[in-house]
Every structure is written in structure tokens, then in C-alpha cells.
Amino acid sequence: MKFLLKRLQKNKHLFEPGGKLERLFPLYEAQESFLFTPPETAKGAPHVRDGLDLKRAMITVVFALIPPTLWGIFNAGLQYNTVNQIADASTMDHWIQGMIIVMPIILVSYIVGGIIEVAFCIIRKHEVNEGFLVTGLLFPLTLPPTIPLWQVAVGIAFGILIGKEIFGGTGFNVLNPALTARAFVFFAYPAQLSGDQVWTVVKDGATQIDGFTGATPLAVAANVPDGQSVIAALNEAGFTWATMFGGAMGGSIAETSVIPILIGAAILIALGIGSWRIMVGGVIGLIAGASLLNLLPADNFSPFTQLPFYYHLVMGSFAFGIVFMATDPVSAAATTTGKWIYGIMIGLLAVIIRVANPAFPEGIMLAILFMNVMAPMIDHYVLQGHIRKRQADIKARRISYATS
Amino acid sequence: MTPIQIKKGLDIPLAGAPRPEIVDIPAAKSVAVYQEFPGLKAKLRVAEGDQVGKGSPLFIDKKRPDLQFCSPVAGVVKAIEYGARRALYRIVIDVGQSETPDVEFQRYSADQLRGVERSAVLSQLLSSGLFSLIRQRPFSRIADPEITPKAIFVNGMNTAPFLPDLNVVVQGQERAFQAGLDLMTRLTEGDVHLCIAPDAADSIKSASNVKVHQFSGPHPSGNTSIHIHHIDPMEPTDQVWTIRGTDLIRIGQLFLDGNYPDKHVISLGGPGVKEDARAHYRVQIGTPLVDLLDGRMQDGEQRVIKGDALAGVAMQEGEHVSAICSAITILAEGREQFFMGWMAPGINKLSASRAYLSGWNGHKRKWDLTTNINGGYRAMVFTGLYDKYMPLNILVDYLVRAVLAHDTDEAISLGILETDPEDFALCAYVCPSKMDISGVIRQGLEEIEKEGI
């Protein structure tokens, strides 16, 4: 690898101040720091620094996203082969078909988003932030596999520009950029992002399986006629708790199965990168919200209110959202208490939007975005409380010292 | 006595701890006295070619003419050097014969010290320059002799890698150490607090006339801010004085012997020091660095740091071991680049984070850390990570943000006046964006000092 390093260093002067390509330094830095650890030494105290950098932290999130991504690829192929009744499709066929469906979506997201990100870094003259590696993968994983590629491009561009860059770039954004992109395409192109038909790729002109409606569990649950049991309706549509947990069904690419998401969550928590407080808070909020709704009189409210919390936990995108979207450190609450409040509120809001708002079958996206906006306010009040407590604590210590 | 337990923090497993043993460095042929106090305007008392005695004033503080800075040797002023904006940088003195006699200071017996007048203590400390070893919080500047501090905190600990071990430095100097403590009690109407580690020597533990407190736990449990916070915390309008235990010995010597104390013990450690040279050294104040380091450094490009690896300042060639330099730490400059380092499992890269394998059990062994920052400079991300390494009740992310926004009121209510930049060294150490957090805090403190509280 010495050869590669020499090559890089030979051309470094071109990108340094005074060089011909000075303006492209962020591009050079990104490339060099991708290939080799930077040679940078501490300018002042402390003269030693920890091994963790933002690149590693972000790569760890990407690493945690691998299980859901692999599942998404496999499941997209599986659904395609099932719905289109491809005879004798083997596991390998599912993988290959899944790749054909999913890879272009991920690639478009990375390429379009990457170009915008780098362009802004060059204009702003700062290093390329690795957070994009996460955003660029998170966004496609939340999309239905049928999405037109141009919408992926427009969506990620919107997310990066409006979600992040207009606020000043990484670290300054109020909203999670990937979710901003997802919300944008959801509202801009409802025909491709909602309804029953978008969750599985169907061959042109192909006939579908008899009885296959394409409806997601959330759509089924929201449309149960009064007086009937939601669980029974779900079971009838083929969605038992176990199948929803396993997730071999149509849906957003990486969100259908809870198992790989739990693996991702375990990685994030074990490696200390994702906030377990937000994740646990979200689950508590959802359990509390669903249980409260259960208390409503069944006769006066939609049957969906009676769905037990353990169904809510495995339905829709809740698991993916709370593990990967809500925990974005930039847009989440930053104080310890704030993280609990933020997580619990997301869970609570998500279930309320699901059940009470017929316009939005899934509530997690809006719940997180709403709480992204609220996070600074939560932190503000936590901070004021902290300051008051600090002063009281100092007074108490002084008195205890004076009297001892 | 039960030690006060500090839970948050981190002991960085840096290799190269100095042995608990003192080596004498021969007297230097030429020494230098530095003007190393930010904000101090020096007025010269000598010219090049002047003969000076040991303890002769070289320069004074323009604002407080009583405060003199003295020559540690007899000899001839060889050079007066200036730094940025023509401010005094250092005065180099060739050791030799001098017609100017050594200055004789007032001598006291140990018993006399316990009853000596405050004004007498102050005047001798000021005229010898040793008063500059006493700092005042907030802002950690040279103390103001006009005020009577609420309390004086003596730091007898060394949790940062690597400060001198008081147990070692105090050997044979027990009388001087106790004399220094007695003198401190003359300077305040409040208490003098001696903060020590649980493994302190009996001679330190049994110090009399002062309140002794033990602190245990990882770094920064040895930082003075932590001691103040846990014993008798400051309000923004309070003023307390602080001094390092190792410096007290020189003060004690001055009053007991009546001579200018021209030597002190410093520690020399870090992976850049040859293994058998990692020890404590007794050096003359102002000894050229080369006298100390010659033959004791590892090969390769090394960084010599005045102070510890976390809060020290990099030194240049040709510098000297100044009066406030209590330790020298040497680290290799880490310019080596590793292929695809971000993907490595991290067995060979130390991290407090579990995202590297070393974060799971790597802190059990010692590491030859270098000055490489292990990453690139990135935007600040609010993670709450810093708070894990800050035992004071301070939300570091918000304090840093308040300072960057020049919101001094917010910074004060978040507790900046209780701190010193060194308290944030661990936060900067773990920062994934490689921010200069200690520098931000320093800038905030300077701003508040300028504006007035």
C-alpha cells in the first residue's frame, strides 16, 4: 500500500493552499482519509487523542445497517418472485432479483447525494462529513421497492439541501436529513409512496396471485369495520404477530422485518454509538400510547384503538425509525433527560398518528420529524432545570461545609 | 478518612510513567528565566551584561511592582530576548562569578512560621517571585496579593499523565512542605485544604494545621477544580487561591533557609523517553532542556511537552526548564498513515469507545500513544459523550456552545468559572470531531475576565 500512499502524497501539493486545485481540497481529504488514516498531529493540548473519530462512528452506523439492508434486498427478491409466481425460484434467485431491484435505488441515493454533499464542502471549504454515508443509505431503505429512480434522486437532493445544507451543514441541521427526504417524497409523490400497490415490484402486465391485495398490515388495521377484531382481520389478511415480526411481506425496503433491525440496534448499543435511552424511551412511549388507547371504549372508537402494544411494536416502520432515525445525534435531544422525553414522545406520537389519523397509515416518520423540531425546546427546559439544580447544589454544599 | 470517590473520568493508559526515584542533574552553565504568565507586563530590572546574584530581581510586574522575578543563579545577563509584540520572552544568564551578592531572605524557624504576620509572608513571597506559584480562581492567574482569599487549595495529587509524584518529591523535604502549608494558613482567614491521593505517604497524610482531604478515582480526580467543587464550591464572586503541593516545597525552603530556592524536582515520562530514564529529576530552575534530555530521548521525531500529555504545551528546541514547569512528557509525533484505518477492528488503536476492540479491554495494558489525532477535524456533533468524562456538574456540550456563541452569561450559569481549561482535556481527548475543547474554554474564560463578571 506504500505505492498508493506515495501516489496520493505526490499530488497532495496540488490541493494544498496555493496549489492549482486548492478549491478541491475537501475532495482530496475525503479520498486520502478514506484510504489512509490522516497524518494530522495534535496542534495543542491534549497531545494524545482517542482512536474514535466521526468517520468510525458513522461507519459503525452503516455497519449496523447492513443486516436490515441485506434483509431488504433478499425480501424484495422474495416478494417479486412470490407475487409474480416465478416457479422454482431458489434462494439465490431471490438474492439476485433483490439486487436488481434495490441496488439501483441505493446507488442513485449515494451518487446524487454525494455529489451535492461534496459540492457544498468545496463551496464551504470544509472537510466532507461522513454523516452522509449514513443519510445516503438510510433514505433508500425507507422507500418502497417500486419507487422510480428519479424520485430517489429528487428526494435525496431535497433531504441534503433543505434538511441539512441550508442550516449550515452537518451538526447544524434541525431535522434528520434522511427523514426529511422521505417526508418530501411522501408528500410530493403520494401515488408512488402510498396505497396498496407500491410495496412489491410487479412485472409489467403480469397477473397477481389470487387474493393478493398488497395492503400492508397498517392499512389493514386502519380499515377494520367497526365492531370487528383487528387481530382477526390481520390474521385473515395473512399477518400474524410472528409473520410481522419475521417480515417476509411487502413493504418499505428494509423495514418489514424486526429481526435484522434488532441486530442493528444491538450493534449500535453494544458499540456505544446509538443512544439506548432514545430507543428504550420510544418503546416505552409506544407501549404507553397503545395501552392508553386500549382503555378507550371499543364501541365509540375505531377497532384499531384496541390493538395491543406488542402488535404495534412489530408493525410498519416503527422499529426501523426508532433505532436508526430517531437516534441521529444531531437532530435528537442532547441532554440525558431530554433523550428520555424525546424518545417517549416519539413512541407516543407514532401510535397516536397511526390510530387516530386516517390520512397517514404510518406515524413514526412524522413523529420523529415533529420531535426533531421539538428537541431544542426539550433541551432548553432541561438546561434551565440543570442550571437551577446546579445553583441549589452549590448552595447546599457551601452550607454543609460551613456547618461541618 | 474515607476518600471522596470520583466516578466519571478516565485514566489514559499511556506508557512511560516516571519511576519514583530522584536523579540529580548537574548544575547548568547557562540558565534562562522566562516570562511565562499570560497577561503579565514585565518591566526589566537588568540590562545585558549586568552581573546578578542568586535571587536578584530580573524583571517585575508593571501592575504590581512588588512582584519580582529573580535569577536562580549568580552570573552575567547574557541576553534579553523578546517575543511577539516586543513582550519579554526570556532572560538568559551565564552562570559564573558575580560582584552582585546573592540575596539573603529573612529566615524563620518552623515555630516562628506558624505565627508570622501575613504582610511579612506576602512581602517575602513577592520579592522572591515565588508568589507567582500561587494562582487565583477563577481564571487561574497569578493571585492578587491585595485580596484575602476565601480558602487556599493545595493540590497534592497527580492523576494526569505524567505529573510528579508528591510522595517522591517530598522525600527529605518534609519540613519544607509543612512550612509551606503553615505559610499558606497565614495568607487566608479561611481554611487551607490539602488534597491528596489515598496512597499518599504518611508524612503528607499527617500534615498539620490544614484540612486534609483524600480523593480517589480516575483522572481528573486530581484536578483542583474537582477538589474545590467537592469540598467548598465557589460562587461566581468568590476568590480562592490554589497551589501545587510540589511548589509548596520551594516556598517552605525559602523561609526556612533564607536562600533563593534554585532547584525543583520535575518528572520526565512518556513513551518518547528511554525506559531507564523515566524518572524524577532534581534540576536547577532554568536548566537548558538539552542538559536534561541529552541521551534520554528515544530516536525519531519526538514532541517535548512542558507539563502533562493532556494539558501541557509543546516546547521548542533550545528552551529551558522553567520555574512553573513541573513535568516533561515526551511523545512520538505520529505522522504514520495506515491503510483503511477506519475499517480495522481496532486491536492496535486505543479508544475509550467500544466501537474499537481496544475499548472493551484495552485499558488494562499500557500504550505507546503518539500525537496523531486519529481522525480529521469535523463539525461539532452534540453527543453528550463529553459528560461521561466530566465529574463536575457541567453539561459540556452546552458550555462549549455558549462560549462559541460568546454568550458569557450562559457560560457563567453553566459553571465555567468553576473550571480551568485542563478540566476539559479528557473531553477533547475523546471528542470524535477532534475539537479543541480546552482551547474553547480558555477563550471563554479570557472573554469573561476581560468583560468582568
Image (spheres, grey):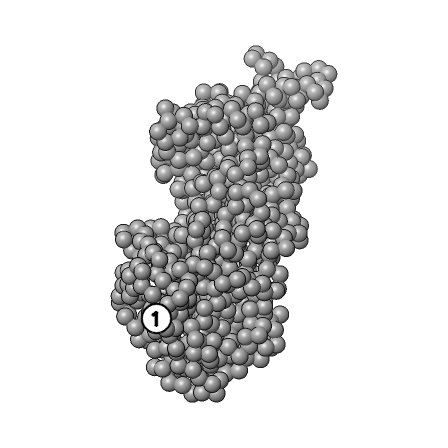
Looking at the image, residue B1 sits to the left or right of residue B176; the answer is right
Res. B305 in view: yes
How packed mark 1 is, by other alpha carbons closer than 10 Å (few <14, some 14-19, many 20 or more), is some
Q: Residue at x 31, y 75 (%)?
A: B146
Q: Chain of mark 1?
A: B
Q: Nearer the viewer, residue A65 or B196?
A: B196
Q: Position of residue A257 (x, y in %)?
A: 63, 34
Q: Position of residue B420 (x, y in %)?
A: 42, 61
* Residue holding disc 1: B100
Looking at the image, residue B319 sits to the left or right of residue A90; the answer is left
Q: Residue at x 48, y 54 (%)?
A: B289
The answer to whether B126 is drawn above or below residue B16 in the figure is below
Q: Nearer the viewer, residue A377 or B105?
A: B105
Q: Residue at x 67, y 15 (%)?
A: A86
Q: Residue at x 48, y 20 (%)?
A: A149
Q: Position of residue A302 (x, y in %)?
A: 53, 42
Res. B398 in view: no
Q: Secondary structure at mark 1?
A: loop
Q: Position of residue B311 (x, y in %)?
A: 47, 56
The answer to whether B34 is drawn above or below residue B56 in the figure is above
Q: Nearer the viewer, residue B447 or B78?
A: B78
Q: Amino acid at mark 1?
A: Thr
**Picture quadrant where residue A320 is located:** top right
